[in-house]
Image: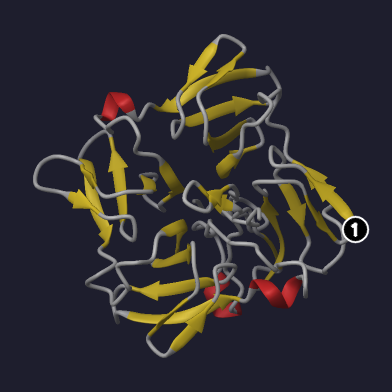
Amino acid sequence: MGKFVLAAVSVLMVSGAQAAALDVSPDIAVELGGATIQQQDVARDDLSGGAPGSIADLGSLPDGADVVGYHEASPTQQLFVLDVTADLGGTYASAGDVIDYDPGTGVYQIELDMSALGIPDGTRVDAFGLASSGDYILSFDVTVDLGGGLVASDEDLVTYSLASGFTMLLNGANAGLDRGLDLDAASELNGNLLVSFDSDGSIGGIDFADEDVLSFDPAGSTWTRAYDGSAIHPGQWQGADLVAVPEPGVGSLLGAGMALLYGLGRRKRKRALLASFTIDQEWRIWR
């Protein structure tokens, strides 16, 4: 059964206080508020429980490709990740590469080439976002040796920058996460990390489902629930998984308790959703 996973989410803020919308993508066709959303779509959900208002323009994607990560850096820079290798108008992207698409020109570029970074074949990015510093936030579907003594498990988050390479951002085991969990959605918001997982679990006294978003405060090493997916679309999240989390921006989503990222499936459970965080100006996230 397909999962409604959040790999990257875009959240729009009204008056800098309350989330007004987020972008979601499923790994199979699903219905949200009576509207059918395909696995290649990234749909804007206004959180009212109704049908999404718009579909992100990612150009022409190959049949069978799932969007597993998404971040709207700007109207002319749509960043996303696919679960398969694809020929995008002469630009060849491997599964897990971060792709940059400009809807105005119709041009695709490779934003981040995983093979060039030494990521071994068979290892896929399943969470993607942007930090407030501009560094890439990444998580992988299996344990991977990133060099320099840095080994990242599938419940960990790392950042990547051209200047410093890979750096551990969240060591899941040290933060109390069950090693059986796979982190499949992530972003940074006002210094806090917003994350979602591929399965249900419990942390810090919080029982969560795979469609929920949790917030981790690195300063206090504390966890809170930032988003309850089943509360937005009652009965429509059954068999669905959230695999992306919101990104940093201009306002405070955490203060509003509505920082989120949706996702759809992962490879083990079919990852497939991404979103970018936006607040009046731009909030970004990732999976």
Image coordinates of residue 124 in percent, x first then y, are 40, 39
Element assignment for label 1: loop
Q: Is residue 55 left or right of residue 242?
A: right
Q: Residue at x 53, y 56 (%)?
A: 244
Q: Which residue is mark 1?
A: 34
Image coordinates of residue 77 in percent, x first then y, are 59, 32
* Residue 6 shows up from this direction: yes
Question: From this viewpoint, which residue is outermost toward the front?
Answer: 1
In the picture, residue 57 is in which quadrant? top right
Image coordinates of residue 119 in percent, x first then y, are 28, 33
Q: Residue at x 82, y 68 (%)?
A: 49
User: Which residue is at the front of the view, 200 or 69?
Assistant: 200
Q: Is residue 146 left or right of residue 260?
A: left
Image coordinates of residue 17 in percent, x first then y, are 65, 73
Q: Residue at x 50, y 24 (%)?
A: 85
Residue 73 vs 255, above or below: the answer is above
Q: Residue at x 65, y 31 (%)?
A: 64
Residue 198 vs 10, above or below: the answer is below
User: Which residue is at the front of the view, 240 or 24?
Assistant: 240
Q: Quadrant of the N terminus?
A: bottom right
Q: Type of residue at label 1? A: Gly
* Residue 7 shows up from this direction: no
